[in-house]
Structure formats: C-alpha cells, structure tokens
Image (spheres, grey):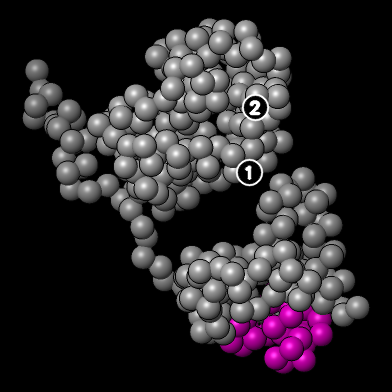
Amino acid sequence: MEQFDYDIDDFLNYCKCQNLRPKTIFSYEQAIRLFAKYCIDTFKVSEAAQVREMHIREYVKYLSERGKYTVVINEQSTKCNHPDNREDTKKPVSKTTINNYLRNIKVFFNYLYENHYITQNPVLRIRQLHNEHKPVEYISDTEFKKLMDCFKPDAFSEQRDKTIIMLLIDTGMRIGECLATKLQNVDIPHCSIYLPADITKGGHSRVVFFSKEMQKQLKRWLQYQDRYRNTEYLFCTNQGNQLTITNFEINLKKYGGRIGIKHIHPHMLRNNFAKRFLMNGGNIFTLSKILGHSSVTVTEDAYLDLTNEDLQKTYTPYSPLSNMK
C-alpha cells in the first residue's frame, strides 16, 4: 500500500469524524484518488509530501486534454460504470468539473499542511480556472401554471409531486432536504419547516418559511396523505418510505415533457426561488441564510446575474423619485 493511500485514508477518517455527508466524502475520495494515481503513474510520486505545485498544474493540463471517463481509479469500477457505453466518453472535461476536482484536492492538501503532515503546501498558488457563469435557468409564470395544471388529480404520486414542486419554489429548499423532511419538523400554523443538521448540505440546521398559499396546499396534502399512507415523512412513496431524489427527478422530467420543458430538474426550482426572491425585493443577505449557503459570496456567485429587464422590474417599485410624497 502506497503512503499516499495512508494520507488519503487519514483525511477521509477526519471528514467522517467531522460528520460530513457521505456524498461529500465520496466526492473528496474520488477526486483525490484519481489525482494520486496520476502522480504515482506519471511522476513516481508515492506520497502526498512529495507533491509539488508543478504536479498539480500538469494534472490540470492533463484533465483538460484527456476527455471524460478515460481514466479510472481501478479497472474494477469499469464493470459497473461501463464508460464505453456512455455517449459523452472522451468528450472534453468541463471547467466546472476540473474546478470541482481542484477544490477537493486543495481541501486535502490544506488539511495535511495545517496538521503538519507535510512541510510544503503545493496548493497555495493554485487558482480555479476562469469559467463563464451560466445564467440561472428560469421558469416563467406561464410555464409554471402549465406545470401545475398537468397533474392527474386521482394519482397519489402526482399530487405528492405537485406539492413538492410548489414547496421547492416557495422555500428554496434543496430537493434532498425536502424529501428527508419529517412531519415532526413541519410547523403548519407558523408556516415554517425546521431542517436539522443531518439532512442539510452544509451540516448546519436552519429554518425555511412558506407562504399562506403553500400553507393551504400542505394542509390539503397532509389530509390526503393521512387517508392513504402511514408515514413519518412529509412526502413518502406508496409504501410509506422516503422518496429518493432519483425517482423524483425521473418524475419531474416526465411532467416537464408533458408541457414542453425539456431540461427541467429540481435545482431549477431552487434557482427560481432565489431569482424571484431578489426580483420581489428580497435582499441577498436574507436569501443567503434561507438557502443555507456558507457565505453571501456563494449566493452572489450563483444568483447575481439578473438581466437588464430583471433589473428594471426590480428597480421600478423602489424609484426614489416615484416614492417621494
């Protein structure tokens, strides 16, 4: 076993002790082990202490040139991932993906340096690749109305999914947080939902709020669900279990297909909440808290891309001259 493996295992154990989500830890491990394999195979670097800035820069160049799914941590993984059957195999790796790898690699080496496992930190001068920010995907009022009208009134799963969609766009919750929400954490009278730390992405509890209109919909939904299902979850499967993100994503694409929206996905609803919140006069600091971002900067990078038309609509009600008495 290479010393590199010991370094990685120590870091992953630390992440587990910090109660990071399994998905986050898996992302760290995947990125770091791929980088370690590259260093071992290309430069005969057998431990993290031997990695230099040059190795990381060469790795970024390598990622930019090699194409997707052309390198794996071990050959065993190809038996379940089947890269040869993927349509995007060997296509360019996006700058977003490379930046995600870089971020994970930097977290790893910063941990080693801060805990004195290495004496030189090779990521100090490493910067993310410049990447054009994609505008937030937007659902118009007309499209949303069509979406709300496409559900079958006698289907349990469709009435459930309709309520989920309404809640996502009204609260800005992540889909994972929404589907993990239990009935005990829903406060209907006060129009709020408590999200405990173990179901949030950042590992910090927070409260989200919903409108009076959503309050009515949730009351109707809970009465409907209680008649047919016995569950601890706000939204459940036909068997009363927690609905998975994958199943909801599949359903959402089906509904989008009914009304002609091809690329609809759960995060689009969160994006729409954020943009509509700002368009309706909400401030970026409050939005950041509601979304559960680690800082206002994260919120600004993600959502401050309003068009001139958006800015005009937002400006008009707050015009100083128009509001003078």
Q: Which stretch did the figure color magenta? A: 32-60
Q: Are marks 2 and 1 in contact (CB under 8 Å)?
A: no
Work out whether 165 lies above or below 8. Answer: above
Dot 1 lies on which element? Answer: loop
Dot 2 lies on which element? Answer: loop
Image-based side of 200 in relation to 258, left or right: right
Q: Nearer the viewer, residue 139 or 280?
A: 139
Q: What is the chief secondary structure element of the magenta stretch?
A: helix
Residue type at numbered disc 1: Gly
Quarter in which the N terminus is drawn = bottom right
Q: Position of residue 119 (x, y in %)?
A: 77, 78
Residue type at numbered disc 2: Thr
Q: Which of marks 2 and 1 is in front?
A: 2
User: Does the rendering let one see residue 265?
Assistant: yes
Quarter in which the C terminus is drawn = top left
Q: Magenta segment: does it hold 190?
A: no
Q: Residue at x 87, y 78 (%)?
A: 3
Q: Where is residue 279 in the image (x, y as percent from the top left)?
A: 28, 35
Q: Total label count?
A: 2
Q: Position of residue 19 (x, y in %)?
A: 77, 45
Label 2 crowd bin: few (<14), some (14–19), many (20+), radius 10 Å: some
CA distance for labels 2 and 1: 26 Å
Q: Which residue is drawn at 58% across and 31% down?
A: 178
Residue 104 lies in what quarter of the image?
bottom right
Chain-order first, disc 2 or disc 1: 1
Q: Position of residue 226 (x, y in %)?
A: 63, 10
Q: Nearer the viewer, residue 1 or 12?
A: 1
Mark 1 highlights which residue? 202
Image-based side of 183 in relation to 265, left or right: right
User: Does the rendering let one see residue 196?
Assistant: no
Mark number, residue 237: 2
